[in-house]
Image (cartoon, rainbow, N blue to C red):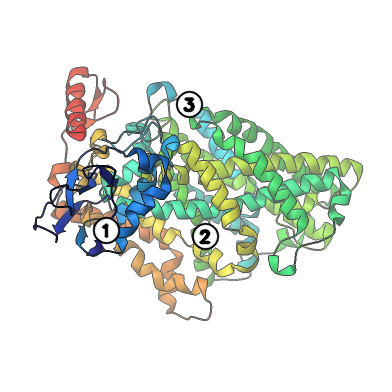
Amino acid sequence: MCQLRCGLAASTPNNEYTHVISVWESKFDFRCASDKLFRRKFSGGHLIRLFRERKHGSATLLAAGKLQQSASLQKSPASAWALVKPLFLNSDIQIRLVGSLVWTSIQNPLHIFFKMGFLSRLQLDSHSDARRSNADLDPVPPAKRTWRTYNYVLYWISDNMSVAAFRNASSLMEAGLSWKMSLISVTLSQVVVGLAIVLNGVFGSTYRVSFTMQARASYGYYFSIVMILMRMIVGIFWYGIQAYTGGECVRTMLYAIWPSFRNIPEHLPVSSNTTTTFLVSYAIYFILVVPLHLIPIHKLQWLFIVKAISTPIVGLAMMGWMIKTVGLNNSSVFSAGNTIHGSALAWEFLNGMYANIGTWSTLAVNCPDFTRYAKSNRSPYITLLVMPATGCFMTFIGVVLASGSNLLYGEIKWDPLLICDEWTSKGGRAAAFFCGFFLLLAQVSVNIAANSVSAANDMNCLWPRYINIRRGQIIVATLGSWALTPWNILTSGSAFLSFMSGYSVWLGPMVGVLISDFYLVHKKKYNVWELYDLNGIYRYNRWGTNWRAAVAFTCGWVPLLPGFIPTINSKINVAEGMTDLYYIGYFWGTLVTAFIYWLLCYLWPAKETMLEVAVLPDDDMVIHADGEDSAEISSDYELRNRSVEKTES
């Protein structure tokens, strides 16, 4: 229960004039302590009018469905504050706010300022109050379904071929695995996460909506906000980390153009955890990348095409140069075998798989954000083949470069940018510039695909009145690049990095519920228009929570927590069995959560959500109970209209 005591003491131009304060809640109780007592409850989304009555000369609270703004409030913030200030000083009126306080703080935190006129220009023209949506949150229309099969091939090549991909095997080999075992571990992890991406991506290519809408169908209208916030936070964090690598790419290019750039006097203190040269490079990176965030997603394929062609060429060229320069016959990296054996080898192998799966677990959740743009429902299936192939290819190139660097420089360099920085001759500097440029392009593509678009979709769902995908990406870029100061995280935040790397403890159970709900519980049959209805079938109950999903999700991550804690603080010791369970955490989190959720839905089904016919965004297509597609324009049109009428009413 949240209580706010307030009173109205400010005068108005004509004793009957109405000033407005917006309070968003699901239900309200009002009690006026001046002349008479009355109570009134109504649904959220209404506005509270504060009237000063001529007859009684005292404050009374009434409910109103629509806003009638005061000109004085629009023109003068000072007069608005003069009106609001007494509300916090006088205890004549008591307002009891009952309902979803979480939704209040998330859905419209700036609503009162917008009604005062400060944010009127930021409101999206496509926003719909009835559906709490906008054009980017609505199902993708046919004209914007432009992604073909080859676009998804190039997309996953683009994602896998990045600076981080060169380092896939580094931690595994340092832990005691041979390069061959490391290669197998990386490839198998890509197969596992590729399967999860394909299974979950079918939802997007079928219903043409993003993960945020999918979460409502499985978790409930309000509880889905928890899932959305979790994914948004990890997306912003990883954006900052990837942006740091992008800054390193720019620094390599500047080193190649102006060798004297290496010798710029240092003006920053050691405590800043960064250097002048890096901050200059980082600022240039940010300026270069911001315009790319303004490109609509359905027109973004060209970026992935350019990257998918250029990055393999860079990788092969660097590998060929390394082999020609030093040869690899005497490399200790290639000749060394496993330094651990038996059960220790098996568990370290699984731990390596879990770590590599964790880097892709976000995409397993947010893949509908991209599959919704598919021209054909089957186009995303190619992911299962392309991901393991490209992952294995780039990991092998990384092993070759690391092995050669050990012979050439006397130390293992897993980062290709560090190798490029060693090229100081005229020809070497030209090669370093072009390698840095194309690796920069690769880094930008990865950051947009894996982080900024997903986090922007989350913001789009939480604040659909003001934020679309384009604005969301700019916000994500600003927060991730500057507010998080990734150079501090990478320098001194090893525990925090371990925490974020182990974030799949929660993302595995999250995708387990989504897949189970889509295939096992609802048999791929949803009503897409009900996803936009606050009081629709996917609200589940008064709290907007599918308790079955909440229980299954909890059962998925709680057992993994003891094994996860030592990765953050090595001083904490737990039972070996808990650590071993954590090493197979993604399998446990996904499969066990999916089974528990199916079992709960089987025993206590949400019957109102079980449909005989799936309602798709296209008027000419429905999916019948037998799973076959057929053209029935009239039936689906009627179903959709009934749903839309119900939503708007």
Which element type, helix, strand or loop, lies under badge 1?
helix
The residue nearer to you, when weighing 404 against 567, is: 567
Could you tell which of marks 3 and 2 lies nearer the N-terminus? 3
Q: Which of the 4 image quarters holds residue 306?
A: top right
User: Does residue 110 appear in the picture of this structure?
Assistant: no
Residue drawn at 18 percent across, 29 percent down: 645
Which of pointers 2 and 1 indicates the residue nearer the eye? Answer: 1
Which of pointers 3 and 1 indicates the residue nearer the eye? Answer: 1
The residue that mark 2 highlights is 355
Residue 228 point in image, percent of width and height:
38, 50
Which element type, helix, strand or loop, lies under badge 2?
helix
Question: Image check: 121 left or right of 617?
Answer: right
The residue that mark 3 highlights is 148
Residue 215 point in image, percent of width and height:
32, 46
The residue that mark 1 highlights is 550
The answer to whether 266 is drawn above or below residue 517 in the figure is below
